[in-house]
Image (cartoon, rainbow, N blue to C red):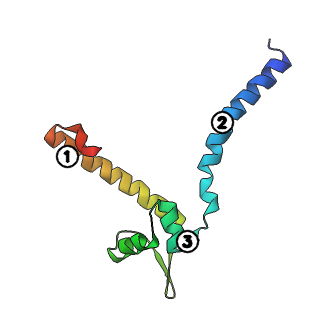
Amino acid sequence: MFDQSFIERLAQALAARILPHLQSHNGNEQYPRLMNATQAAAYLGRKSPGSVYHLVNRHEIPCVRHGRNLRFDRLELDKWIAADKSQNHKLCSSTANERKDESVCR
């Protein structure tokens, strides 16, 4: 039905479009499972480790004590981010519904 060269060109075109997306989802591999505050700050897109310590002091971020050192589990941080996203979405939706103004969530 289709010639082999057409199928190969199609496969190459699809691979060129799909591979960058697959590689971006595996970007977490550059971070270890347990991170220090500097690594966690970079992972979370924060400017400094101090901002991560601030969240720790407020008991807002999951962390693990390893002796006197704090470590941040990458998988727990992912869960924390997902929970924060859903909570903020709910807050924005309820605020927008109350005020009838969707610009509140921007």
The answer to whether 36 appears left or right of 62 in the picture is: right
Question: Which residue, as the protein is rendered here, is positioned at the far bottom?
Answer: 67
Q: Which mark is residue 35?
A: 3
Residue that label 2 marks: 18
Residue 82: x percent and y percent? 42, 54
> Which amino acid, by three-letter code, is at mark 1?
Thr
Q: Quadrant of the C terminus?
A: top left
The one of 47 and 15 positioned closer to us in this rendering: 47
Q: Would you place residue 92 above or below residue 59 in this image?
A: above
Q: Earlier in the sequence, mark 2 or mark 1?
A: 2
Which residue: 79% across, 18% down?
6
> Label 2: few (<14), some or many (≥20) within 10 Å?
few
Residue 68: x percent and y percent? 49, 88
Which residue: 36% across, 73% down?
54
The answer to whether 71 appears left or right of 96 in the picture is: right
Q: Earlier in the sequence, mark 2 or mark 3?
A: 2
Residue that label 1 marks: 95
> Label 3: few (<14), some or many (≥20) within 10 Å?
some
Helix, strand or loop at label 3? It is strand
> Which amino acid, by three-letter code, is at mark 2?
Ile
Q: Quadrant of the N terminus?
A: top right
The one of 97 and 103 positioned closer to us in this rendering: 103
